[in-house]
Image (cartoon, rainbow, N blue to C red):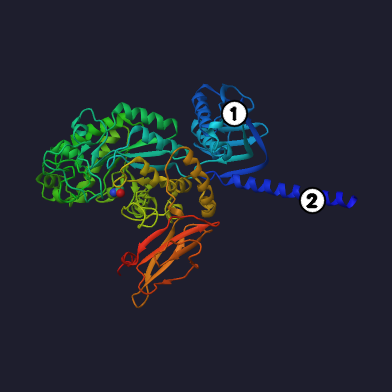
Amino acid sequence: MKTLIKALNLIFLFILIAACQNESESVGEKQLTIIPLPVKMTLNQGQYELKGNSVIYYSGDELLALAEYLSDQINISSGMELRTQQGTGKGISLSVHDDLPATLGQEGYKLDISKRGIEIAAGNTQGLLYGMQTLLQMIPQEYEECAECGEDELEFQYVSVEDFPRFKWRGLLLDVSRHFFTIDEIKKMIDEMAAYKYNVLQLHLTDDQGWRLEIKSLPELTAKGAWRVPRTGLWWDREVPQEGEAATYGGFYTQDQMRELIEYAKFRNIDILPEIEAPGHSLAAIAAYPYLSSTGRKYNVNPGSKFYTIDDNSICAGKETSYEYMEKVLTEVAELFPFEYVHIGGDECYKGFWEKCPDCRKKMKENNLKDEKELQSYFIKRLEKILESKGKKLIGWDEILEGGLAPNAAVMSWRGMQGGITAAKAQHHVVMSPVEYAYLDFYQGDPAIEPPTYSMLRLNKVYEFEPVPEGVDADYILGGQGNLWAESVPVFRHAEYMLWPRAFALSEVLWSPKDSRDWNDFVQRTEYNLRRLDRADVNYSLSFYDAIITPSKNEKGELLISLDSELADNEIYYTFDNTCPDDHSSIYKKGEKLTIPKDADTFRVVTWRDGKPLGRIITVKLDDLLKRIPVL
Ligand code: ACM
């Protein structure tokens, strides 16, 4: 009997040790769920139980709205309804102090969960909101999955967080010109941006394909410029407007709607940066007011057909009436948007019509401008003067460097990092937004199965983005931005597909310390956060689960295929025999170069993990793979 009791005791001890090990593992797992990763996060043993009758306490009147926001968000995630009350007590406490560590800066916060309850403290409401976003990501999944059940208890791991951003500009751009998105859709994007601690939303409000902002002194901009003939199909391949055809696709935001959106975003720590494109990309404005171009020709708003260098889409830099027009637009924009910057575009301006324009030639002569680049620089410098007279700073795409940068302009570097490097070395502020890391309009997986766009940008590449190049003074790099151009984004659901999870990766690049980046860890946190997106009914892409196909040729010119995956922990199966691959097909061995069996015409590949299919099956003709190999 004694031996039996001893044996039972041993078993009991063993179970206890195993349980403790599980507990510390689960502590570890919880650490993996926050995006962007906090600067400092210490997990402690124990859990705080937040009850349904708990209270959100706040330290002053100015925090009431934030306390109510937190209560609403907890309710959406868990069904729990928490009261809010001014004062202090155990539950959740929100407070603003001025004696927090200086390292927290303007946007930092402290979050402590212990037997004292949940305490979020910051130097201001901005920091407090970020602390709340971190807490919201800590709501245990099992309760979140039961949002309708009205659970009356949430368990939070004891933790101590001190957190602040690496960069002050953490932006995303939404192109509302190429396709129109409603105010409610933009609000939905803002909600998700706030959850991942972004703080700038650039709205690309004007382009060749639509003018989207009410300008009261120039009503034709929206009466005519906001509308184009309806088309679907590939962008740039669409039929031009036909004689008498009604322009029924489009829309615009009234100034009242925009004011409401600005306020909505501001509450969530997000500034809206308006972009008014000039002098190029201006066909919608020119369609509304033909006197704006060098030729004065009449045009329609472009529906996604070829027109560049054929139609005159540049505002004439020679005529004074162009500057009068810009002054009217920028005056209303400066009054409407509280953000310190206005983006004036400046990219891809076709100057062929300027070359033949007598007004442009005259302006160049009068001002000793040696070429059209200097004429564009003159134009941008005049815009800067207008903006400065309204108390605003100018920011533009890196083409504004050409012909001489306006004295105080900030540069958004998109044609790689070089424009940003040049501008920072000339002591101008820079936002890094290079095509190779930050163009969220590019497809994110194999082109055989992704909706087509200009080029490829995978999730793991976004995660490698480093906004401060070597040899550049980091003080001039305000931060970075991901750009979602919308030529191939006809509906908002697809905008979400393009944004997430790549915008998770970018949020971590822009918020978390550089040396804390860890791809495998990020993937796990991404998977957790995708379930958050499911609950918020936000679309996203799972392309990062798919195989990566890299074709090459041997010395005889024969096709070879290498395979890879963005993830570390999956297998890759493939076929050449026109069957669907699964875990009984040929398995790919890392580093192999597959040769093509005689007469094979199609390649298929799929990833598996833990005995289940993971990515999509990619089917691609071998001839098409050959075409992907660059001709040297
Ligand atoms: C740009 O992508 N043209 C800024």
139 lies left or right of 385: right
Looking at the picture, tell me which residue is in the foreground, 402 or 565.
565
The crowding category of the residue bearing disc 2, from other C-alpha atoms within 10 Å (few below 14, some 14 to 19, many at least 20), is: few
* x and y percentages locating residue 491 in the rendered image: 33, 41
**Residue located at (64% from left, 46% from top):** 26
| Residues at circles 1 and 2 in contact by the CB criterion of under 8 Å | no
Kind of residue at badge 2: Ile
Q: Which residue is mark 2?
A: 11
133 lies left or right of 540: right
Q: Earlier in the sequence, mark 1 or mark 2?
A: 2
Corner quadrant of residue 94:
top right
* x and y percentages locating residue 339 in the rendered image: 36, 34
Above or below, 322 against 61 in this view is below
Corner quadrant of residue 624:
bottom left
Q: Which residue is mark 1?
A: 93
Above or below, 624 against 49 in this view is below
